[in-house]
Image (cartoon, helix red, strand yellow):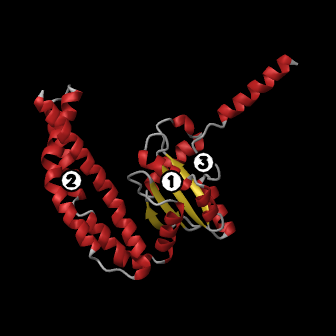
Amino acid sequence: MKTAMLFICAAFAALAACAKTSTPEGWLDDYEAALKKAAAENKYIIADFSGSDWCGWCKRLDKEVFGTSAFRKGTADKYVLLFIDSPRDQSLLTPETAKQNPELIQKFDIHGFPTVLVLDSTGKPLVRTGYKAGGPEKYLKMIDLELFHGDDIKKYITPIEEILGRYDSEIEEASKKAFEKASAKYPKNKRKFQRHVQKIMFGEVFPKYIPLIEKSFQEAKDVKVPDFLEDCKKDTIGQYEEHFKELKQAMKEYKSSKKTSDEK
């Protein structure tokens, strides 16, 4: 009897190991199966492109939105859920998804994680978004707005996003140059390399752009939108404000650490 029980336990353990996957319960990871299910049930597809075991914003989106019972309940009648993962631990993928997922990333022009697409049952992208704060109800409301009021979103909200992201490409270019300079100066000293990048970004680049970004927030807040888009406007600005707050906190910590270092 004891030997039989050990055998049964070992068998279950083997099955559990075989079933190791990053795909959340209630989500599909087969694109073609999701299309068929959406067509058969007359639903849209919410496709979450994630880096489940390394992407911080992906983990936050899962915890705050996708992993909640409110989200599952809110999507049950209208959406098929599709999870397209790019984990560092490739054992979390089946051979099929390991082949499929990079192809889908290329097909849908995915450049960052998390990227969330709403597709129709033919695979046509209708909405493209990512992490948004506020919980499942607000997230689903945002998707519905973009899905059914796409033209209004483009007319009123997209210009606000353009205002708020006005300096993104310039900052990105400055960061690339900072990395190049640091790499050329300290090719073999990782610690000095990191410090030099910080010196350029926190000492030169961010102090230049922070006042400009602050003006952008005020400009964005002054944009008039229809009443039914006020919450969307507020959420859009709030999203950028959250990232900006993190940047300013990082600046504060850098100045504090530099001051301490100088005093020594």
What's the distance in space between the residues labelled 2 and 3, CA to CA? 36 Å
Q: Which amino acid does label 1 sit on?
A: Glu
Please tell me which residue lies in front, 221 or 199: 221
Tell me the element at label 2. Answer: helix
| 15 w.r.t. 124: above or below | above
Residue occupying the point 46% across, 72% down: 146
State which quarter of the image contains the N terminus. top right
Residue 64's disc is 1
Residue 187: name its quadrant: top left
Q: Give how far across and how far down residue 233 sits, in percent.
A: 37, 71
> Which badge, 2 or 3, is on the more N-terminal residue?
3
Tell me the element at label 1. Answer: helix
Residue 171's disc is 2
Which residue corresponds to mark 3?
24
Tell me the element at label 3. Answer: loop
Q: Nearer the viewer, mark 2 or mark 1?
A: 1
Residue occupying the point 23% across, 72% down: 219
What's the distance in space between the residues labelled 2 and 1, CA to CA? 29 Å
State which quarter of the image contains the C terminus. top left
> Which badge, 2 or 1, is on the more N-terminal residue?
1
Q: What residue type is labelled 3?
A: Pro
Residue occupying the point 41% across, 71% down: 232
